[in-house]
Image (tube, helix red, strand yellow):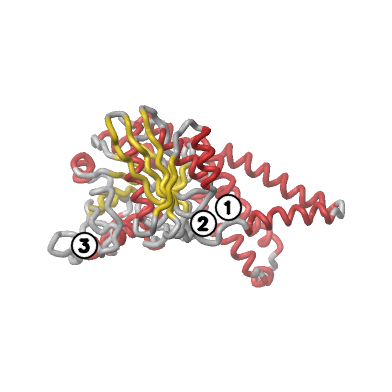
Amino acid sequence: MTTEPTSQRNSSGAPANLSSGGACAPEQPFGAVCVIGLGLIGGSVVATLARLFPSIHLVGVEVDRTSREESVRRGWVHRAYDPADEELAVFLADECDLVILATPVAAVDSYLSFLADANYKGLITDTTSTKSHILASAEKLLPNPAKFIPGHPMTGSEKSGITAARDDLFEGINWILCPDECTDPEDFRRLHELIIGMQARVVSLRREEHDKAMAIVSHVPHMVASSLVQLACRHADASRSLMRLAAGGFKDTTRIAAGSPDLWCGIAFDNADALHDGLAEMISIIESFDEALTARDSATFTALLAQAASARRALPAAWVPSTDNLLEVRIPMVNRNGVVAEVTTIASSAGCNIQSIDIDHISEGNAVLSLILTDEGDVGKLSVELIKAGYSVSLSPLMPEE
């Protein structure tokens, strides 16, 4: 069933807050976008795009009728389809140029098959927390797997569903993209522009590294948070007085434990091997504290705490790039596949944030990749690593008006 707004439309036929944007609206890299899955992440995607890219034709896909109706009621999409709606297949084949899969991993196979059957030829990205399964499925089910660029916004909430969706959920967060040697540079540039326009920052990561990295920075922490709550519950008496003693530190550390058990069980089993290794390493770290405590070795115990404290303080409190210290990096691209994937991954590893990407085509098979960097990261390391990788690099600062 298609859900459409009935009262919030202007003279152009668009929902009221999907019509013309203000003078500060970012450049529009896609004309028509389909977001499949209208839960917390998918709902926040359409909410954000509706606010920041008001000229994009936005379509949602969701099996839950209430969520479809809510996305339309809020003016976030032009239409919301049930997957079985015949009009959806027509839209995908004739109009859509970007599909964002915002579903659990268990649902991606059916939607990838659906996109292939609908003769969809545009770009595809996703928001799933693990990549091994969806990469294998894309390779098997899509007629052109190179049109799939894996993605993962590093954000979320203990709440779920479209009622928890927000149009500022992605502000300042890291949004992982995993291009490879088959990724078309222009496809990556457009997707990068869309995500930067959503006020996130793009971090490029090699596909084979994604799931292991997520186990360490996301999946193991969730299991640890759940374990801390379990520990407190075991020692809480009938009046729950211990829980009332829980201070801000405990609440902050365990906030994510309130997330959906079914969702997190799925994530854990999708990434079982990497999560197992991470938990084993976590156990060994906790044992190090216990061994030092048992041996009354205060020097080792203090050193363990100091190492963690130093690393934690080094994390940036917020992402506030300076627009007064932009740097342009120009890199010739000569008949070589995988340039964008390699260069952006090197930039991410050096901690550099790419504000924008441009591709200057000189001749057939020859182009110059231009990256505009903010004032984050180690530019010296970036230069060295690019030269080591065989690239010719030129750097030049940009004035704010440029």
**How many numbered marks appear?**
3
Q: Which residue is mark 3?
A: 20
Q: Nearer the viewer, mark 2 or mark 1?
A: 1
Q: Residue at x 48, y 55 (%)?
A: 375
Numbered disc in front, either 2 or 3: 3
The disc placed on residue 222 is 1
> Residue 103 appears at what percent x and percent y?
39, 47
Judge whether residue 202 can be spotted in this image: yes
Q: Is residue 221 above or below residue 253?
A: above
Residue 218, percent from left and from top: 55, 49
- Do the residues under discs 2 and 1 have CB atoms within 8 angstroms? yes
Secondary structure of residue under mark 2: loop
Q: Say which quadrant the C terminus sits in.
A: bottom left
How crowded pointer 3 is (Cα within 10 Å; few <14, some 14-19, many 20+) is rated as some
Q: CA distance from mark 1 to mark 3?
A: 41 Å
On the picture, is 208 further left or further right than 14?
right
Identify residue type, mark 2: Gly
Q: Judging from the image, what secondary structure is the residue with disc 3 in?
A: loop
Write down the quadrant of residue 247 in the picture: bottom right
Locate residue 18: give its quadrant: bottom left
Which residue type carries mark 1?
A: His
Q: Are marks 2 and 3 in contact (CB under 8 Å)?
A: no
Q: Reading the chain from its start, which is encountered first: label 2 or label 3?
A: 3
First reached walking from the N terminus: tag 1 or tag 3: 3
Could you say which disc has been placed on residue 398 in the image? none
- The residue under label 2 is 259
Residue displayed at 51% across by 47% down:
379
**Quarter residue 226 falls in:** bottom right
Badge 1 crowding class, 10 Å Cα cut-off, few under 14, some 14 to 19, many 20 or more, is many
Label 2, label 3: how many angstroms apart (C-alpha)?
A: 37 Å
The residue at the point 29 percent across, 60 percent down is 25
Q: Can residue 69 be seen in this snapshot?
A: no
